[in-house]
Amino acid sequence: MKQEQIKPAWLSEPEDNNDLPERIWPSNVSRDSDGAVAFGGVAVSDLTAQFGTPLYVIDQTEFEHSAKAVHSALDRAAKKIGSDATVYYAGKAFLSVEVVRWIDKLGLNIDVSSGGELAIALAAGIDPKRIGLHGNNKSAAEIGRAVSAGVGAIVIDSEIEIERIAATAGAQDRIQPVRIRVNTGVHADTHEFLATAREDQKFGIAIEDVPALVARIRSLNHLEFLGLHSHIGSQIFETAGFVEAAKRLVKLHAELLKTGPVPQLNLGGGFGIDYNEGDQSPGVEAMALDIVDAVAAACRSEGVPVPRLAFEPGRAIVGRSGVTLYTVGTVKDVRLTDGQVRKYVSVDGGMSDNLRAALYQAEYSTRLVSRVSIGKPALVRVVGKHCESGDIVVRHDYLPGDVSNGDIIAVAATGAYCFSLGSNYNYLQRPPVVAVASGKARLIVRGETEADLLSRDACLQKD
C-alpha cells in the first residue's frame, strides 16, 4: 500500500498541530495560557468536568450568526430579481426546543419531517403557521396533528396524501395549505445516499404527473395549493444541479399558472459546508445568486412573473456551530502491509453519536484541545468503542504524535446530523447537548443514563 492510498490527496501535514481553521471550526474559539481550548468562552476542562464526554457543544453565537447570514444572503438574492425569500430551518439537521426558540427569535420558519419533530417545534412555542411538514410516509396521526395545529404548509410527497390531507382538513373544517414535492430527476453532485431527486428513489412526484395532481388539489375545498417544492440533495458544492432543477420547476410552474395561481416556489436546501481542508464550499451567498439568476432567466423565457421563493437550509446554519468532545482511551500504531504506520486513536463515543463517517464515508477534522503539543504530527484514524470495524469518527487527519490516554480531542462541524442520527448501539447512552455563549454553558438536551436504557426494558419492569 502506497502513502497516497492511506492518505487522501487533499490532506496535508499541518504546519501547526494546534491551529483551528476558521472556515471549519466555530469562530468563537481560543486557547488559554495553558494551551487548552475554550468554545464560546467556556474552557474545555470546565465543559468536561461538568458534563463529561462524549459531549455535543453548540456555539449559540455562531449558530445565530450563521442563521442571520444565510437568511440575509437568500433574501438579498431573491430581492435582486424582484422577489423575496422565506427561509425554513431544516430541523432534521439538529432539533431541540432551545434551537427552535433561537430560530423563532431570529424570524425564520422551520420545517419538520415527522410527528416527533413537529411535537418539538410546537412545544417550543413557534407559531404553527411558520412550520412546514415533510415526509414520504406521513401517518394519519401526523397529518391530523399538523392540520389541527394549523401548520403553514404540508408537503405532499405522493398522490395518496392528497385525499388523506383533504379528508382530515374537511373533518376539522379547515383549509390546509399544501405544496407538491417534485422529483425533478436532477442528479446532484453528492454522495448517493444524500441525493434526493434521482429517478429511482422514494421522494417526490414525477414532473409529468404533477399537473393532474394539482388539478385535483384545486378541486378540493379544504386544500390550498401554495406551489412546487424541490430538494435535490444535501452537502452540495456545485450549483449546476440547483440551476437545472430551477429551470425544470419554472417550466412546470408556468404551465400550472395557466389554470390557477401558483404563489410560491420552494427550492429546498442542501448547501454544503467545509468539514476538512479538502472541502471548498462556495458559500450560501454565491450559490444563492446563481440559483435566483436561473429562476429569473427561466421566468423571462417562460414569460411569467417571478414567484415568491422559499429555501430550507439546515447544515449551512447549524453545522459549523457544533463540535463534539471526546476523551482518548487506547492509542496504538497499526503497521500496514508496506511498513507504513497509521495511529489508531480510540475515543469514548463513536458511530452512536456520529454515524455520518460510517454511513456516507464523511471526512471530519479533529484537534487536540486539552493542551498544546509540539509533537510531530502523526497520521491518525479516530475510532469509537463499538464492536464494529466501520466504527470510524475521523477517517483521515493528523494529531500530535504524543496524543495519549486522557487527552480531550474535538471533532469539528458536528452540529448537523450527528445528534439527529444518534443511537444506542451496544447500549451506549446518547450524549448531552450543551449550548455555550459569552463564557457560559447551558444544558439544552439531557444526556442519557444507564437507568434510562433499563427503564425501557419491559421485561425488567415486570420483575
Image (tube, rainbow, N blue to C red):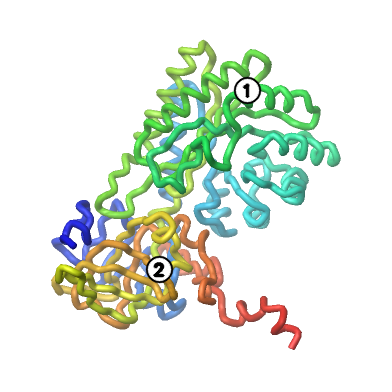
Which type of secondary structure does the marked residue at label 1 adopt? loop
Does residue 344 lie above or below 211 as drawn?
Answer: below
- Spatial separation of the CA atoms under disc 2 and disc 1: 47 Å
The foreground one among 310 and 420 is 420
**Image check: 21 left or right of 273?**
left
Q: Please name the residue shown 56% across and 75% down the image.
A: 448
Q: Residue at x 53, y 47 (%)?
A: 90
Image quarter for residue 438?
bottom left
Question: Looking at the image, is 323 positioned above or below residue 295?
Answer: below
Q: Secondary structure at mark 2?
A: loop
Density class for disc 2 (Cα within 10 Å; few <14, some 14-19, many ≥20) is many
Residue on which disc 1 sits: 262
Percent across and percent down for residue 324 are 40, 66
Type of the residue with mark 1 = Val
Q: Nearer the viewer, residue 348 or 226?
A: 348
Going by the image, does 238 lie left or right of 229? left
Q: Is residue 377 visible?
A: no
User: Of the residues under marks 2 and 1, which one precedes in the sequence?
Assistant: 1
Q: Nearer the viewer, residue 200 or 232?
A: 200
- Residue drawn where x is 58% and y is 46% of the image: 110
The spot of residue 347 in percent (x, y) is 36, 75
Quickly name the residue at label 2.
391
Q: Residues within 10 Å of mark 1 (few under 14, many from 20)?
A: some
Judge left or right: residue 60 versus residue 332: right
Numbered marks: total? 2
